[in-house]
Amino acid sequence: MLIDGIYLDGKTSKRHNARLEVVNDHKLTRIHLTEQQQSLSFEFNQCNIESRLGNTPREIAFTDAQLFITNNNDDIDTFSQWQNNENKKSFLYHLENNIPLISVFTIAAILLLYSTIVYGIPSAAKVIDHNAPSFTSDKLFSSLDILDETVFEPSELSTKKQQRIRKLVAPYLANHHDLQPKLEFRSGMQANALALPNGVIVFTDDFVELAQSDNQLLAVLFHELGHLKHKHMTQRLLQDAMITLLVVFITGDVETFDLITGLPTLILDMAHSRGFELEADNYALQQLNQHNIPLQSFVLIMQNLGSYYHEKNDEKSNKLADFISTHPTTEQRIKMAEKFNQQP
Amino acid sequence: MNQEESHSATAAEGVQTPKKTSILNFEFRGDGMEYFKIWIVNILLTIVTLGIYSAWAKVRNNRYFYSNLYLDDANFRYLADPITILKGRIIAILAFIAYYVATIFAPVIAVIIAIALLFAIPYFINQSVAFTNRMSAYKNIQFRFKGAYGEAFMVIYIWPLLGILTLGILYPLAILKANEYFVRNSSYGTTKFDFKATYKDYGMIFLTMIGIALVVGVPVGLVAYFLPAFAMISPLLLFVMYFGLFVYFMVSMTNVFYTSLSLVEHKFDAKLTRTGQTKVILINLFFTLITLGLYLPAAKVRMTKYICSCITMHAQGSLETFTAAEKENISALGEEFGQVFDFA
């Protein structure tokens, strides 16, 4: 069998018309240079046959960068079967040309990608995080310092009031001593409460003013303790890192996908975040129940916070904000509390 | 610069016979459907191997695009070995994780790493371009790149900075310098490329863009201000203008680049048109959106096809006299660092 193609000597860009054949019981490759009336011989097992790829010309590389190129892919496939280790090379080509398999692959790829991001990564983050030694979260965010420098101002609440609230929460914090919780007061950031991974829970002045009763303060304290208990902040950091890595890994060439991949990551991040909030709410409700504090206080503070933010933003932007919000809507949370109430 | 001139002089003296100018078209012979199959198999194998296959996927992708690119009826080739890429990728990913962990646990060390990285970037970019060029071949001759750290530092940091400090007046020059640096240090085998553009070539592009923005943007803004009813559609008009400017920029940049490019006595030319480019982008955008991204590979093929069809080479005589450069080894690490830290 003779295969027509082009021969290049590896030193110049000159192309020679050539014919390739395998002789001597598949041990020798011979290239006949048509114009020069000359032929070159190589050991068949030393030549490297490129794997087949679409309709692209096939290349066979010999020693010293010598090269034979041909469009006759089928005959080269026959040749490569004679080489000992060549079975795997056309495997990909057959995979890529099996239409039913491709269809299954397409669906599988979509499903796999979706489930990895929606289920795989969050649970992986959970596992890693709950197994990480506890000192990690101590160092992770001594970030109250950073927040103090950027958004927070010292609290303007009277020392007396601060003392009173500290005394109020002390027994509950003691209950959770494994999380090493600590309460801090700051002003700035509107009405807000947040939990940092090292156990610091911050109440802002506006929030303390907004709460109408001690029980409402406790409801939010439990919510933040829920975040700490489930290690949400660290999980989120891990998730972000893993999604970034996944995107880089799979897409390989970043530039084509920049626009497409940036968006879903953001949306998924927000979806996860809502899940975290609901988990923390659930924990708060459990704790309230356990300490015989009326669940109504949770509902009230949520309503308060809801109307507080409602006043700050106008109607229209609120609707959009709900849609892409990191927190569940107030109605959702209240509904959840009522549902919890009905449980035996 | 003297070096290149003397080089081209000797090359010109070498051949006495008057040379015939022939116009050679670049042509991309890939097919959207065919590439889709390769792409989807790549994605699936990458997912099931937890990212390890991504190195092979990259090689297969690049091989498809290089091997389907024809000039003078001969195709380009991509030569990289997946194992080399995998090694580079693993090291880069480890470094990325180390950096990420450092940003969380020891911000000071992270800052030091970031500064070190800043100074390492020109080196990595040089390595990256050298690797890509060396792994690209045409008519069995590899491309080369040999850049100096100092010059790379200038075009990556200093020139763009000067561009910003002069409120954009020197920015066209920054782009010019960068192109000049990357082209003049590249070679096809032993033959160096040259780049001859003027400040005016690039300056005109920016001036035209500023002109269009003023002529269209200001009236739209004024009308929206005085006629509130018109305010609804003005963002749309501004978006259309932005898109138009984007296409204009892309087309003009590509055209100027290729008309300024030469390889000894061989010249290049590009005639991308704004309508042609707009059509390709709109079709791609439409199909990519309605197929939720599955059209992406075909979109890439369409874009490549269009751009290639607009580029020509004005060859003086034969393209068969180029000679190969010495063998050399460059790791894929530089390139992979570039991808992971997203600065390439």
Image (spheres, coloured by chain):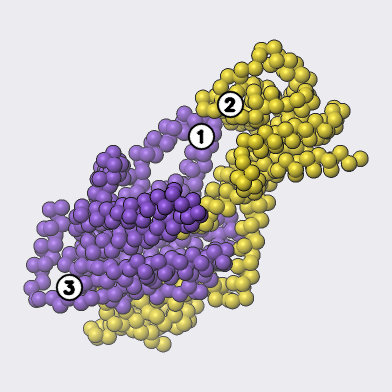
Chain colours: A yellow, B purple
Q: Chain of mark 3?
A: B
Residue that lies at the very extreme toward the right in this rendered image = A344
Q: Residue furthest bottom?
A: A1
Horizontal and vertical percent position of residue A175 = 78, 24
At mark 1, the secondary structure is helix
Residue under circle 1?
Answer: B102
Q: Position of residue B158 (x, y in %)?
A: 28, 41
Per the rendering, the mark at residue B316 is 3
Q: CA distance from mark 2 to mark 1?
A: 29 Å
Quadrant (top left/top right/bottom left/bottom right) for the N terminus of chain A: bottom left
| Residue where numbered disc 2 is placed | A188
Q: Is residue A250 left or right of residue A209?
A: left
Please, is residue A198 above or below residue B206 in the view? above
Q: Chain of mark 2?
A: A
Along the polypeptide, which appears first: circle 1 or circle 3? 1
For discs 3 and 2, the disc positioned in front in the rendered view: 2
Front: mark 1 or 3: 3
